[in-house]
């Protein structure tokens, strides 16, 4: 059975569910049953040997698990005498038997079914008199590896995930990143290491702290094995949403990969992979999501651990946790002396500029730029994601910049590179074509200033160009007679007393001398002003859109007048026709 027929056949189960289940709920049944049948078929050849080994080791009062894994030849096993075909032989007890069969899987697999809340679906299907019919459908699909390879099975499963994400597109964007965006990110991640990645037997680690359904891990693995079939990508991830976590683990399991390093839980408040560092990382954290629920844990780590923890530079406002994920990834970078790391993260616009000098957001940007970690930011088109139409940006961060990039940041404006989708999915109306991905990858790879038809596409800046100093400009307080009031005590005794109502601030570029700026920009307007140097703060922001703004002069007045006259004449004519 070819891949297309197989996915169509599995999809036909939806016909049985129609009426008892909403469309958006089909995945809750079809995905775990597909996994169950695949694992059932994979384990069949070693099933008898595993059961025999279990009996032998239990008699010897030994923990059977390591022996059972070895006998099964997989990363998992099942100790039930039942299988999906045998379940068909006892229609009256199928519910209890199916439940006990699932419970007999090794813990890592059992965890998948628990996160799918599969027991709930078993009960629901049984009540609707559908359980036997659905199980029978899957019992008749041959998913043995000799007929359906891991790669084919992975493709089928991903197609099903995509279909269900589309059907429930109101929430798909939270756990599902568009494939073409992932392909672009993977290209950007690996482009500078192409030579190293083609060496035989190369092993690299990849981590996604917001793994969702595992799309980023899958596409990265496909990319690397396409470049070098001998290369091995060891994958790590963590995911908060139970069902997405289950899908991610199942997808990897179906492709024959180790799932022991995929963790369930909140990455920010409970890092499931502490002290681990990685070669590559990818992430699409939720946009603009508040972190109020985990504020206590985050604040504690920031205050107690400082730069020895993950959040040393500062904390963003509670309404948007995006920059917490950025700092988390930075903490996971392999030290530069050990080969370093590179990661890509998708963020919305606010992390670029939100927060004044001295704020948590500004201090985080300052840390990233002053440590020369930011390699590039790519601005994507709007309407690219399923649950939002906002502008999004890919940040490429590394602690092993090539020589020609050191001390610099590249900004790429890809906001006009898109094609319209044939059918919108939620807020997603646009997509990147293969040509767009290739062009953006090339712009990034060349790391040069590029202008096309008078419009800048790629610009290179020094890190310091994003920095500024906020100075506090004070002016004296005057008494009723117009005399300057002076301080009577403290270190400013005898000097003019500042009037808080006249206090102002100015942002001075880091590259400029504060004194020269003050003499040029402030003193000519307020001759009695001075700077309170104790209040000077350094800030960083990345005004992305400003750097790509192209001024378009207004049309000539004569042209506008002529157009207005034409419209007015047309209206007058229409009114005249109505009155006839």
Image (spheres, rainbow, N blue to C red):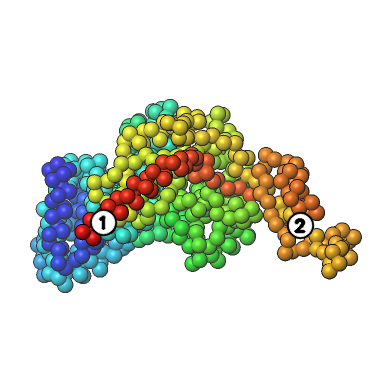
Can you see residue 226? yes
Q: Nearer the viewer, residue 249 or 100?
A: 249
Q: Which residue is mark 1?
A: 576
Can you see residue 106? no
- Dot 1 and dot 2 residues touching (CB under 8 Å): no
Q: Residues within 10 Å of mark 2 (few under 14, many from 20)?
A: many
Using residue 12 as the reference point, say whether residue 191 is left or right of it: right
Q: Position of residue 433 (x, y in %)?
A: 31, 38
Q: Residues within 10 Å of mark 1 (few under 14, many from 20)?
A: few
- CA gap, disc 1 and disc 2: 66 Å
Dot 2: element: strand
Using residue 69 as the reference point, say whether residue 413 is left or right of it: right
Residue 361 sits in quarter: bottom right
Q: Quadrant location of the C terminus?
A: bottom left
Q: Nearer the viewer, residue 174 or 450?
A: 450
Q: Nearer the viewer, residue 305 or 562?
A: 562
Q: Earlier in the sequence, mark 1 or mark 2?
A: 2
- Residue at 16% over, 72% down: 127
Q: Quadrant location of the N terminus?
A: top left
Using residue 182 as the reference point, say whether residue 425 is left or right of it: left
- Residue at 27% over, 52% down: 573
Q: Position of residue 157 (x, y in %)?
A: 24, 49
State whether residue 345 is above or below residue 83. above
Foreground: disc 1 or disc 2:
1
Which circle marks residue 474 in the picture? 2
Using residue 83 as the reference point, say whether residue 248 is left or right of it: right
């Amino acid at each position: 059975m070819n891949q297309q027929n197989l996915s169509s056949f599995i999809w036909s189960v939806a016909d049985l569910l129609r009426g008892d289940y909403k469309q958006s709920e089909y995945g809750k049944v079809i995905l775990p049953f597909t996994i169950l049948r695949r694992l059932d078929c994979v384990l069949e050849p070693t099933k008898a040997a595993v059961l025999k080994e279990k009996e032998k080791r239990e008699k010897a009062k030994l923990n059977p698990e390591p022996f059972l894994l070895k006998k099964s030849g997989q990363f998992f096993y099942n100790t039930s005498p039942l299988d999906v075909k045998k379940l068909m032989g006892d229609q009256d007890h199928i519910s209890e038997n199916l439940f006990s069969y699932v419970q007999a899987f090794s813990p890592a697999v059992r965890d998948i079914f628990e996160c799918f809340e599969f027991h709930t679906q078993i009960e629901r299907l049984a009540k609707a008199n559908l359980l036997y019919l659905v199980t029978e459908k899957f019992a008749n699909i041959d998913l043995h590896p000799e007929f359906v390879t891991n790669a084919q099975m992975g493709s089928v499963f991903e197609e099903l995930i995509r279909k269900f994400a589309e059907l429930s597109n109101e929430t798909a964007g939270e756990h599902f990143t568009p494939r073409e965006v992932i392909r672009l990110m993977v290209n950007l991640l690996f482009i500078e290491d192409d030579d190293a990645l083609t060496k035989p037997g190369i092993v690299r680690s990849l981590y996604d702290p917001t793994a969702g359904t595992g799309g980023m891990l899958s596409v990265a693995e496909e990319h690397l094995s396409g470049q070098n079939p001998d290369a091995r990508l060891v994958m790590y991830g963590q995911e908060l949403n139970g069902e997405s976590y289950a899908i991610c683990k199942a997808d990897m399991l179906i492709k024959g990969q180790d799932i022991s390093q995929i963790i369930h839980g909140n990455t920010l408040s409970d890092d499931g992979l502490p002290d681990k560092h990685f070669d590559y990382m990818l992430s699409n954290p939720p946009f603009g999501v508040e972190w109020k629920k985990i504020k206590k844990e985050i604040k504690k780590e920031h205050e107690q651990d400082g730069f020895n923890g993950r959040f040393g530079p500062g904390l963003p406002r509670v309404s948007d946790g995006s920059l917490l994920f950025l700092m988390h990834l930075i903490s996971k970078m392999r030290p530069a002396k050990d080969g370093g790391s590179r990661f890509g993260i998708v963020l919305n616009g606010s992390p670029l500029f939100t927060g004044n000098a001295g704020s948590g957001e500004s201090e985080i940007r300052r840390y990233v730029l002053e440590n020369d970690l930011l390699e590039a930011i790519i601005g994507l088109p709007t309407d690219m994601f399923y649950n939002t139409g906002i502008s999004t940006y890919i940040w490429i961060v590394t602690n092993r910049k090539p020589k020609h990039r050191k001390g610099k940041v590249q900004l790429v404006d890809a906001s006009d590179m898109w094609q319209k989708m044939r059918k919108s999915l939620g807020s997603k109306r646009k997509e990147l074509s293969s040509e767009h991905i290739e062009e953006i990858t090339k712009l990034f790879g060349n790391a040069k200033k590029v202008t096309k038809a008078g419009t800048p596409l790629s610009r290179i800046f020094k890190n310091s160009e994003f920095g500024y100093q906020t100075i506090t400009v004070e002016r004296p307080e005057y008494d009723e007679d117009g005399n300057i009031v002076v301080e009577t005590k403290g270190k400013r005794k005898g000097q003019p007393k500042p009037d808080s109502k006249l206090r102002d601030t100015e942002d001075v570029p880091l590259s400029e001398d504060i004194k020269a700026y003050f003499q040029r920009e402030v003193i000519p307007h307020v001759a009695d002003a001075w700077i309170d140097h104790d209040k000077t703060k350094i800030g960083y922001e990345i005004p992305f859109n400003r750097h790509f703004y192209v001024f378009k002069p207004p049309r000539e007045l004569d042209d506008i007048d002529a157009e207005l006259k034409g419209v007015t004449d047309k209206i007058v004519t229409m009114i005249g026709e109505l009155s006839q």
